[in-house]
């Protein structure tokens, strides 16, 4: 926090959520909490970076889905994904968003299977509350 500040948090969170970098956004939340400063700017920074990273992963995976090596495999499993959305619609996204599956993986899978943007937007909207829950848990643990 002292050396890289908010820019470091942004880049770290972006890398974690766009490319599954091994240091998750929760680490940056902990550094913000342990620094003793205001938590508003770090949480806005982490949330913005995470949302941008999710969009990056979605778009990148959408391009990868067009490659022959991925397209053939995806087409074999696509009917199951389509049935899932036909049957559960937005509830499938809500449950997936609240599951322990990493956000970056959800974004990549959404892009690979070319999930409609309205479903992807719904999933992304669940990201900020999920980050806030993580923040609250980390804050609670730090204060103990």
Image (spheres, rainbow, N blue to C red):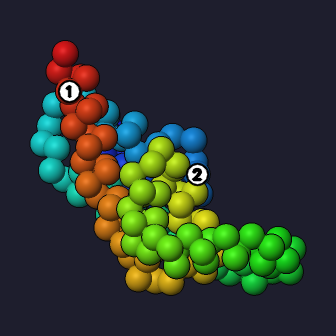
Give above or below for 127 relative to 89: above
Q: What kind of element bears circle 1?
A: helix
In the rendered image, which residue does mark 2 sit on? 20
Q: Nearer the viewer, residue 111 or 36?
A: 111
Q: How far across and how far down the image is residue 111, in percent?
A: 59, 74
Give above or below for 65 relative to 10: below
| Residue depicted at 39% across the width and 72% down the height | 90
Q: How far across and how far down the image is residue 97, in percent?
A: 42, 57
If the image is split into quadrants, where does the N terminus sit? top left
Which circle, 2 or 1, is nearer the viewer?
1
If the image is split into quadrants, where does the C terminus sit? top left
Q: Is residue 92 left or right of residue 28?
A: right
Q: Nearer the viewer, residue 114 or 37?
A: 114
In the rendered image, which residue does mark 1 sit on? 140
Q: How far across and how far down the image is residue 74, in percent?
A: 76, 73
| Residue depicted at 29% across the width and 58% down the height | 128
């Amino acid at each position: 926090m002292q050396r890289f500040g908010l820019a470091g948090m942004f880049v770290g969170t972006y890398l974690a959520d766009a490319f599954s970098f091994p240091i998750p956004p929760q680490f940056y939340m902990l550094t913000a909490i342990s620094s003793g400063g205001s938590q508003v700017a770090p949480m806005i920074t982490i949330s913005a970076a995470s949302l941008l990273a999710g969009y990056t992963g979605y778009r990148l995976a959408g391009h990868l889905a067009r490659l022959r090596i991925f397209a053939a495999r995806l087409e074999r499993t696509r009917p199951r994904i389509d049935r899932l959305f036909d049957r559960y619609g937005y509830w499938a996204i809500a449950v997936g968003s609240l599951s322990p599956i990493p956000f970056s993986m959800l974004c990549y899978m959404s892009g690979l299977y070319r999930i409609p943007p309205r479903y992807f937007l719904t999933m992304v909207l669940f990201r900020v509350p999920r980050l806030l829950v993580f923040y609250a848990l980390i804050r609670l643990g730090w204060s103990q």
